Amino acid sequence: MLFTVSEPQNCSADITAAADGESEYRNAVTVETDDHDLKDFDEAASSVTISSNLNSEVKTDSSASNNSNSVGNELTDVEVKEIVIKGCSQEHKDSVAQSLSAGTKVLSEHIRNDITSVSDSNRKRKFERFTSINDCNEVDGTITNSIGAHFHMYCNECGGTREFILKNKSKRINSVLTPSGSLGNLRTILSKAQIAVCSECKTETEVNPATLSDFTFTKSGKDEHHTLDEQRKNAKEKVEKAFNSVLSDVGTEEINESKTDDKRTIYQKENRLRQNERKAVFNSIENSDTADRVSFSLTDDLIEAGDGLTHIINPLSFDAQTFGMMPLFLKSVMSGTLLGSCGTLFTQLGAPKNRISCFYEGNGLPLTREQLTGGINAFARAFLHNVATNIHNDILNHSKAVVCDESTLLCRELANKKKAKDGSRKSQIWVMTSSFTSPIRAAWYTVSQSRNAENVVDILKSGVRKDGLLTHVISDGYAGYDSGIKTLEELTGCRLKSARCWTHGRRGLFKLLQNTWLLRIYENELLPKGESFCNFEENLKKFRASKAGKKMTDSDASLLTIFYLINALFVIDSSVIKAHQFVCDTEEFKQDLLKARQNKSAKIVALIFDYI
């Protein structure tokens, strides 16, 4: 087992994620739709005909309701009561008001405690309709852990990391939602929360399946279908109880007494029924002869990544689909695949969190938008933040040179803070990549509120030390990098060398040639497709001798020559890369590239500055 905890778990991330989820929800864009059925009802109700005992018709419309002095158009309280209770038996006439009041109280109580009603009220939408074609209560399989397995985790009684042994004893059965198929359909996975014993103090601790990395997944047979009816039964019971209380002779005292029942006792009863149903389905799948079982061991999928690097998961043998069915957090109803899919929709596809919530709600997700948003935020903080930190450290610790750049970006997390501070909503996104000769090929991103040199210090300071490998920073010439490097030298006593990016230097010249039509001459006359790169000088002489080229000035020719020489730097590097078949992390490649730059590129750079 690989799971090890060195200190007590901190729940502050969950609290922060919940608060952020509520904040994201409040700032989310809402969509209001018109309810055409309600409009039709309003139009039909604008004119209502009521028949009295004398077979006369009294018509009321919107104009009559606004005219209090109209005679014969208003109904008195007695007339309304007679019309409403007409057709009822005499024994029911006297108790209509009491029954209606009692029924309203009972229905209000149950609707107020219903999850879907709380969900709808929190969204603050005028109308909202979702039709789910998927049933998330369908059980797709079960997850079990090996009995007697040994693993290490933090023991609260001992106050340190201890060895635990998993016992054949379960406290309850949990359910987790996970996507199934390519359409985002959700299914339920059942797993046991087992008991583990500390090897020293013998304290029993509940172990959630998300704690362990080795498990067995049992998938339901093709011809077997298991569905949890928890939500359907609860809803049906509430409706039946509400209507029975309205239709029966239930007094006000009895209704008030039912409202004051112990909520904890009611929850315990419902939980026992829920656990019994889960246990029956769990045992049915485990004892089935047609079920498919897959054993998963993360230890067997680890491979070495290189000297001094942490072991990584082998992507060829790793069963991501099965591992993704595990709950991502302790006691979480969302699986790793579900939150990973939400993270992909949000970060890579740019879908807003409210649309992600609508998408999965249409696929049967029984969670509020705040809960899903909080789950996405917790997923990013608990997993993606650690991955980003490791990428940042690996780049600085294994690269002699790093490439840095920054650009303007509208980041919603910082937009409100910046607007309150200086009236601007723009923020800065920074990127740092390793050089292509580094054994680590990676890119790292971060977002800041400003473009100050302090950000450069924060990005590079962990890699600037006397025993560090980092020596050069390649940038676009922004003065903040030089200022940040100077500050780092004062703090650490180490001096980084600032280098300029030839791509950024070439970009301005490229735009100038493009706007003055010189780029067309370069591509069509001087170096047309299929022409050798070394024929530039000869083609330039021929073109200037031609009738069209005699109009070219010496300054235009100098600009084209500088552009050609800058491109030559990339051609020299490309020739070495192709010679090594694009394998750029070997010592042979580094030596050949160094020789090419010293013997060829250095001379080209000198010529460029001579022209300038």
Image (cartoon, helix red, strand yellow):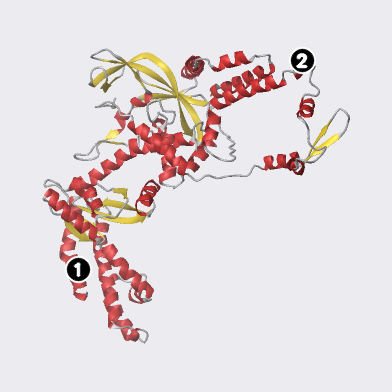
On the question of residue 205 being in view, the answer is yes
- Residue 90 is left or right of residue 264, and the answer is right
The tally of labels here is 2
Up/down of 452 relative to 560, above or below: above
Q: Quadrant of residue 95?
A: top right
Residue at which label 2 appears: 91
Q: Quadrant of residue 548?
A: bottom left
Q: Which quadrant is the C terminus positioned in? A: bottom left
Instruction: Name the mark on residue 605.
Output: 1
> Which one is in front, 323 or 504?
504
Q: Residues within 10 Å of mark 2 (few under 14, many from 20)?
A: few
> Which one is in front, 86 or 513?
86
Mark 2–mark 1 distance (CA, rounded to whole Å): 105 Å
Q: Which quadrant is the N terminus positioned in? A: top left
Residue 473: x %, y % from top left: 21, 55
Residue 382: x %, y % from top left: 33, 35
On the question of residue 135 being in view, the answer is no
- Residue 243 is left or right of residue 392, and the answer is right
Up/down of 252 relative to 420, above or below: above
Residue most extreme to the front: 69
Numbered disc in front, either 2 or 1: 2
First in sequence, mark 2 or 1: give its number.
2
- Residue 532 is left or right of residue 334, and the answer is left
Q: Residue at x 18, y 55 (%)?
A: 485
Q: Amino acid at mark 2?
A: Glu
